[in-house]
Amino acid sequence: MSDAIVVEGVGKLFRRYVERPRALSERIVRGWRRAQPPEPFWALRDVSVRVGRGRALGVIGKNGAGKSTLLRLVGGIGRPTEGRVATYGRLRALLELGSSFHHDLTGRENIVVAGVIAGLTRREVLDRFDAIVKFAELETFIDNPVRTFSSGMLMRLAFAVAVHTDPEILLVDEVLAVGDLGFQYKCLERIAEFRRDGCAVLIVSHDTATMQNLCDDILWLRGGEVAAYGEPREVIDRYVGESMAETRRRMADDRPAVRASSGHELRVNENRFGSFELEITVVRILDAWGKQVEHIEPGQALTVEMEYRTSRPLSSPHFGVKICRADGLTCYDVTTATDGHVLPELDGPGRITLSIERLDLIGGDYFVDVGAYEREWAYAYDSHWRVYPLRIDSAHQGHQGVVCAPHQWRFELE
């Protein structure tokens, strides 16, 4: 099998500049000491990987580990300080969805512009136009200016354009959490189709469950260096194990159990883990009318509301919500980080809410897990596991799989 991506001994050196006084008054206040020279730091050091055609490599690690730097070097954005990067094939990068759209143009006009920029001819874009719009599920809004689109609509359109440009190499950076659950599965299936057609995929994500199912190999970066590289389950287990070990090291085992809003007890080391510098004090599962529930029907809206308090100022923590089946299968997993939200410093009490427009899961028993995590994903502040039950009621029996997507049957007799 020939290689589509080759990374050999790659290192990338940046220089961290110390803030310098901008005015004479600042210099007088700070003193006349000589300005400090820029500090060099290696975002990547001695990284070597190969991705064959039809294979997928996932890259995991904490924020600042060098994941996006590696992706950008492979995408041709910048050059390595040392080593070699080579790609063989037509490359498409899903790095910042929607960033190239012109907000005064309509969705239709932006499709044409984005497609041509991606290397298609105008004729090719027009031939694929209907398929792009259908994939994005935006038939009703496609002639509106994209400034009127919600962030979810914008991301769906950008993803749809990108995956209709016949890539031979696909780079994906934290953009799989686009749209509702059904659309996310459609995106994953399209990536799987690319692989079957011989496309090489390099993907960065904090969603370890998706990475384990999607990727052939996993690269774990720690501080810009390779911590592990190989079979997905083994590498992910080591990565998660390191985070859990740090979480347990910071835990106080003698904390008493507390009563959760679901009525269940939260016992430390059983279904509650964390350093508790930030505590999730109340969790509410609400339906479309704001009523606290433990069961809904497929396709209904769901809101997860978390109240928290901090014991000290915390810089940019992450919050996450995961919906798991009773047998442990992760069906939905989203965090503020994967959605691109950078939270401010938190100090004291507050509330954060996740609104899911439609939860298209088949009928069955699930749990809603919630958590708050340190900004570098080094450990959990407070993670609640298997505390909040959710029943999906369905009149349709015998459905298989995970997603209960809106559908209808039509019969025609000839």
Image (tube, helix red, strand yellow):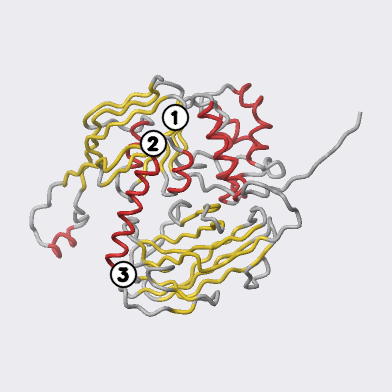
Residue 185 percent location from the top left of the image: 58, 43
Q: Quadrant of the N terminus?
A: top left
Residue 249 percent location from the top left of the image: 27, 65
- Residue type at tag 1: Arg
Q: Nearer the viewer, residue 179 or 392?
A: 392
Residue 71: mark: none
Residue under the image location 72 percent in, 48 percent down: 406
Residue 225 percent location from the top left of the image: 24, 41
Residue under the image location 28 percent in, 30 percent down: 79
The residue singled out by tag 1 in the image is 55
Indicate the secondary structure of the residue bearing disc 3: loop
Mark closest to the chain's N terminus, 1 or 3: 1
Mark closest to the chain's N terminus, 2 or 1: 1
Q: Image quadrant of residue 326?
A: bottom right
Q: Image quadrant of residue 78?
A: top left
Residue under the image location 40 percent in, 21 percent down: 88
- Residue type at tag 3: Met
Mark 2 in CB contact with mark 1 (< 8 angstroms): yes
Residue 217: mark: 2
Q: Residues within 10 Å of mark 2 (few under 14, many from 20)?
A: many
Distance between the alpha carbons at the discs numbered 2 and 1 = 8 Å
Which residue is most to the right? 414
Indicate the secondary structure of the residue bearing disc 1: loop
Mark 1 in CB contact with mark 3 (< 8 angstroms): no
Distance between the alpha carbons at the discs numbered 3 and 2 = 32 Å
- Residue type at tag 2: Asp
The residue singled out by tag 3 in the image is 251
Indicate the secondary structure of the residue bearing disc 2: strand
